[in-house]
Image (tube, rainbow, N blue to C red):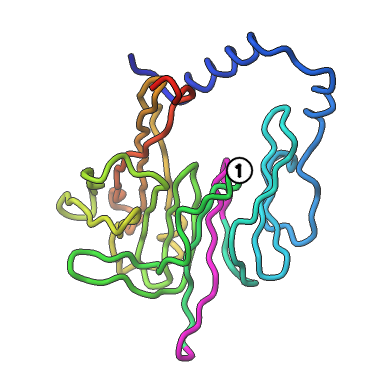
Amino acid sequence: MTTSPRLLLALTSVLIGASVAAPSSSSAAFAKKCPAKAHTVAVSPDGAYSRLWTVGGTLYGCIKYGGEQPRARRLGPWTPGGQVSFVSTTAVWTRAYVRDGVRSDRLWAADAYTGERFLAGKRLVPKSGSAPDGEARIQRVLAEHGAAAWVTQTGEVGFALDVPWNDDETPSRSGGGPDAELTVDDNRTLVGRFDTDPGQLADTLKITTDDGEGDECGGVTGYTLSVRPEPTAAPVKVNWGRAWDGPFPSYC
């Protein structure tokens, strides 16, 4: 049996709603929101169910699910002027880094619901082939649920997943030259280096997902990063599978 994460979520919600009586205070619980905070850097579209803010040199997140109390987590270090992108429960941000007087940016990403990080102070240029990873300045970061993408000011494009499907799978790239398998640097990959305007490159950066497939034990969702180095050319695309856990792991 296979199904999509969206269907699993819907089925789980129905089962929980059918088997658990709502507490008398449920309406009050649903009414509670993530409280407004000074130095907020990102919020959900309605401003109620998720929020990121800073206190000193630390980034915090709050997520509100259904009848749960709003939950705040410490996500990681922050420096003023960092870039941030926040989608669903995934926060992706950069932090300034200076070594020997040379400025660069380091990459962080975390789940604001659990507080778990999947990127922690990583260099912006993942290793590729025999080339080591390298420093760069950030042009743009982009979050998707469980994923991060970014463009540097020198034209490198990177892609990361919190949980790649398996260690044997290599993300594949199409467009912008011969199709190729990319090097995986832990949970990151270098999509490519492009000799083009980094602003224009960043404006075309996108992450899309398919419906996924799996069962009550878990499954995989396909993620596709696309970027267009040349306005009139076909986009460069990278396909990579992200693993997810099912709603009933104790039965698996």
Looking at the picture, which amino acid does disc 1 mark? Tyr
Classed neighbour count for the residue bearing mark 1: other residues with Cα under 10 Å, few (<14), some (14–19), many (≥20)? many
According to the image, label 1 marks what residue? 113
Q: Tell which residue pokes out farthest to the front in this image.
A: 250
Q: Residue 34 versus residue 223: which sits nearer the camera?
A: 34
Element type at marker 1?
Answer: loop
Number of callouts = 1
Vertical relation: 243 (above or below) 9: below
In the rendered structure, does residue 90 fall within the stretch colored magenta?
yes
Residue placed furthest toward the left: 178
**Residue situated in front as seen by the camera: 195 or 170:** 170
Q: Per the image, is 177 magenta? A: no
Residue at the image position 36 percent from the left and 47 percent from the top: 225
Task: Residue 24: give x, y in percent of width and height.
Answer: 84, 18
The range drawn in magenta is: 85-101
Please name the predominant secondary structure of the magenta segment in the image: strand
What residue do we see at 44% from left, 59% from top?
202
226, 233: nearer the viewer: 226
Residue at image position (48%, 19%) is 7
Relative to 1, residue 203 above or below:
below
